[in-house]
Image (cartoon, rainbow, N blue to C red):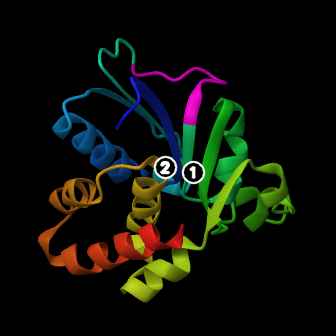
């Protein structure tokens, strides 16, 4: 990292690996000698609800919370979640999001429709993380795809960031996640 501080909001739906992503990012930053604060907001995560994690990296971070309009980057594992939290983005910041659509309960029950045209409303780059994860061997590796894209987007040291990821996952999934990370890295 070459900035004095960086505020990243990670958002998604329960079960997508947003919390793992925040731990990987935190480990990488600590290994690079930065102060890191994480704060996780689970909501109804276990029921497929919204999950939000604040990751603040810098020389001396006092609070783990990112105020609205202050995030340098939003890493979104689902595009409606990207839109839901876009107001956290600061002027000049951007969103890196998965194009995956996970239907929230009101859509599933027929009480609402999934919004159309989300991509046009987002100031960001969409990645088909689900397809790339399937190419790597498992849909659950979509978070590793997004972490690979984040690594390249932020200009992080690829080898060290990938190492942080691989140290946080079960040994039996290393090769699949390594491939997913590479596919995400190359997607940008």
Residue identified by numbered label 1: 49
Left or right: where does residue 72 sit relative to residue 110? left
Above or below: residue 32 compared with residue 12: above
Which residue is pictured at 22% across the width and 60% down the height? 159
Which residue is pictured at 57% across the width and 51% down the height? 49
The answer for how far apart the CA atoms under marks 2 and 1 are is 5 Å
Which residue is pictured at 60% across the width and 24% down the height? 70
Above or below: residue 73 compared with residue 133: above
**Quarter of the image with the N terminus in it:** top left
Residue placed most toward the observer, 37 or 96: 96
Tell me the tag on residue 140: none
Residue 84 percent coordinates (x, y): 71, 43
Above or below: residue 1 compared with residue 157: above
Above or below: residue 125 compared with residue 90: below
Residue 147 percent coordinates (x, y): 40, 58
Residue 67 in the magenta stretch? The answer is: yes
Q: Extreme top residue here?
A: 62
Stretch of the chain drawn in magenta: 64-72
Q: Residues within 10 Å of mark 2 (few under 14, many from 20)?
A: some
Left or right: where does residue 140 sit relative to residue 52? left
Residue identified by numbered label 2: 45
Residue 59 percent coordinates (x, y): 29, 19
Residue 73 in the magenta stretch? The answer is: no
Residue 79 percent coordinates (x, y): 67, 58
């Amino acid at each position: 990292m070459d900035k004095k501080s960086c505020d990243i909001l990670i958002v998604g739906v329960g079960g997508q690996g947003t919390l793992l992503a925040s731990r990987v990012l935190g480990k990488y930053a600590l290994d690079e000698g930065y102060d890191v604060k994480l704060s996780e907001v689970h909501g109804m995560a276990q029921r497929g609800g919204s999950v939000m994690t604040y990751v603040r990296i810098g020389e001396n971070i006092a609070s783990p919370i990112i105020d609205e309009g202050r995030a340098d980057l939003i890493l979104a594992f689902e595009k409606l979640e990207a839109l839901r939290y876009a107001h956290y983005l600061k002027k000049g910041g951007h969103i890196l999001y998965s194009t995956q659509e996970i239907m929230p309960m009101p859509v599933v029950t027929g009480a609402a429709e999934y919004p159309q045209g989300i991509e046009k409303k987002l100031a960001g780059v969409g990645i088909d993380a689900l397809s790339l994860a399937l190419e790597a061997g498992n849909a659950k590796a979509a978070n590793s795809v997004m972490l690979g894209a984040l690594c390249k987007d932020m200009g992080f040291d690829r080898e060290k960031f990938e190492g942080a990821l691989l140290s946080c996952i079960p040994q039996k999934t290393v090769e699949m996640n390594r491939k997913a990370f590479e596919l995400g890295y190359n997607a940008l």
